[in-house]
Amino acid sequence: MFNNAALDVVIGLIFIYLLYSLLATILCEWIVTFIGLRGKALRKIIFQMLNDDKSEIQDLTKLGNAFYRHPGIKYMIEDLIFLKKNPVYISKETFSKVVIDLLRGQNVVPGQSFRQPIQNSLDNAEIAWKFSKCQEDQKQEQGAKIDSETLSYLKSMWADSQGDVQKFRAHIEIWYTEMMDKCTGVYKKYNQMVLLGVGLFIAILFNVDSIKIAKKLENNPAIAKRIVSQASDFRKANPNLFSSRAVESPKDSTITERIQERLDNKAMEVVSEDIGKTNDLLALGWSSKGKNCDGYSILGWILTAIAISFGAPFWFDLLNKLMSLRAAIAPKEEEIQKKNSGSAASNATKIKIDG
């Protein structure tokens, strides 16, 4: 069973992880937004759906490349000076429309049945939509081949729909919706790798050594109590910090941006106040006086980076639970101390009387 002293050490560590995880989350989101990581994850999944080799090579004869060259997708791409940012969210309706457009071709008129053009594309294993290609000062029309595995699945959905274009569209949308769960997993994996790298950078930059921090908190109960008090104040000031956080998927990008804006606004406050206070109490950071690190510091930084990679919401939830546990066991511990002090006093009085 934990006592208050042991809990204070654990809570102190968790609170430090929370503060630096919050800072890392903000930095990570800036990096993810800048490099367009959500768009990259979505593009990877779409290429896995449309290309048998699952690669993103710039082969214009690939269906995946044709998908991103379609006007419905092409104009969603942000063409910046240093990099291109792919769309972070494509609706299932847009996905199915683009796929059907590629199969039926652009030379269609209102009222025309799309059934035969789609059937022809599936029979020929080549999309009907043509793209312009400049070659030897001449423009040529070029389509894209449909790889065998993708073709088999498209034919299967076409057969299930009995050649009905609307049913075929519905099957494509179901396929896309199911793959979006995988897209969320891919994005989280990418995001986790970025967060781990940012966490290691922060651990070294601020010299946040988990091993040394744990020893300081264990050897200095007064400092541990002050850190716990600071954690309590932080909880009271931010009771619902992550209560409405968005799921980390491309679909929720607008919600994530609103929450990110709220976190960004808190960044300077966290760095200047809470992190500054803990650094002063524990003498963290780099100093020109004394020994800043030793052979165990690398291990301590790695442990800190791993802890930060769990994310601020994880540490915030755990902090709330342990603070509630501490509040529950504190009165019991005080009662035991009073009983022990009372027993000691009565024994001392008895000894005097007997004497």
Image (spheres, rainbow, N blue to C red):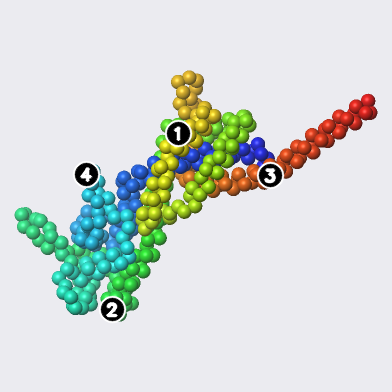
Query: Does residue 53 appear left or right of residue 2 in this picture?
Result: left
Instruction: Look at the image and tell me in which quarter the C terminus lies.
Output: top right
User: Please, what secondary structure does the residue beneath circle 1 have?
Assistant: helix
Regarding residue 300, the answer to whether it shows in the image is no
In-front residue for pair 257/129:
257
Residue 164, disc: 2
Instruction: Kindly identify the amino acid type of the residue bearing the numbered disc 2.
Output: Asp
Q: Residue at x 51, y 32 (%)?
A: 277
Circle nearer the N terminus (3, 1): 1
Count of picture labels: 4
Instruction: Look at the image and tell me in which quarter the N terminus lies.
Output: top right
| Labels 3, 1: front one | 1
Residue 272, disc: 1
Regarding residue 35, the answer to whether it shows in the image is yes
Q: Is residue 233 above or below residue 94?
A: above
Instruction: Kindly identify the amino acid type of the residue bearing the numbered disc 3.
Output: Ile
Circle nearer the N terminus (2, 1): 2
Instruction: Kindly identify the amino acid type of the residue bearing the numbered disc 4.
Output: Ile
Q: Which residue is mark 3?
A: 329
Circle nearer the N terminus (2, 4): 4
Circle nearer the N terminus (3, 2): 2
| Labels 3, 2: front one | 3
| Labels 2, 4: front one | 4
Q: Mark 4, residues whose alpha carbon is within 10 Å: few (<14), some, or many (≥20)? A: few
Marks 3 and 2, how far apart at CA: 67 Å
Marks 3 and 1, how far apart at CA: 33 Å
User: Please, what secondary structure does the residue beneath circle 3 have?
Assistant: helix
| Labels 4, 3: front one | 3
Residue 30, disc: none
User: Please, what secondary structure does the residue beneath circle 2 have?
Assistant: loop
Q: Residue at x 21, y 61 (%)?
A: 70
Q: Which residue is mark 4?
A: 81
